[in-house]
Image (spheres, rainbow, N blue to C red):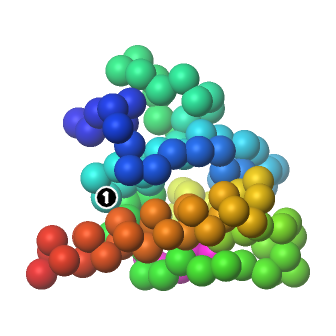
Amino acid sequence: GIRFWETPEYSGWLTKQGEMLRTWRKRWFVLKQGHLVWFKTNVVNERAVTRGEIPIESIDSVSVASEAAAGKPYAIHLEGALPARIGTKYLVADSERERSQWLEALQKAMRERTSTST
């Protein structure tokens, strides 16, 4: 398995919608080795349980989402063949700066996936 607690490519708080209830919840997201996973807290060690995962290869594009579309400011829109259980295609950052950094990290991870799979 991937050791998500060791030197992630990027990590931080993002808010996502729940799969069933559609309530917005803040989760600690970690990007590493082609996987975007999330945890309930930012205490990520070998005992931490992942709450969900999006394989980077299932994302076709990431972009800035309008507040009108996402219902919240600083949202990121994920497009692609995302696993149905993820429920939402919007991830919401706490600030414009955080959103930019996440977009950059996700786009970089997507480029790296593309170059390794061809």
Residue pictured at 83% horizontal, 68% vertical: 73
Tell me which secondary structure the magenta stretch mostly adopts: strand
Q: In the rendered image, which residue does mark 1 sit on? A: 34
**Residue 106 horizontal/vertical position (percent):** 46, 66
In which quadrant of the rendered image does the C terminus lie? bottom left
Residue pictured at 38% horizontal, 70% vertical: 108
Residue pictured at 71% horizontal, 57% vertical: 93
Residue pictured at 75% horizontal, 44% vertical: 25
Q: Amino acid at mark 1?
A: Gly
Is 94 magenta? The answer is no
Apparent side of residue 107 relative to residue 12 in the rendered image (left or right):
left
In which quadrant of the rendered image does the N terminus lie? top left
Nearer to us in this view, 115 or 16: 115
* Residue reaching furthest to the top: 47
Apparent side of residue 89 relative to residue 67 in the rendered image (left or right):
left
Read off the magenta span.
77-82
Identify the image quadrant of residue 115: bottom left
**Residue 86 horizontal/vertical position (percent):** 56, 58
**Residue 51 horizontal/vertical position (percent):** 53, 38
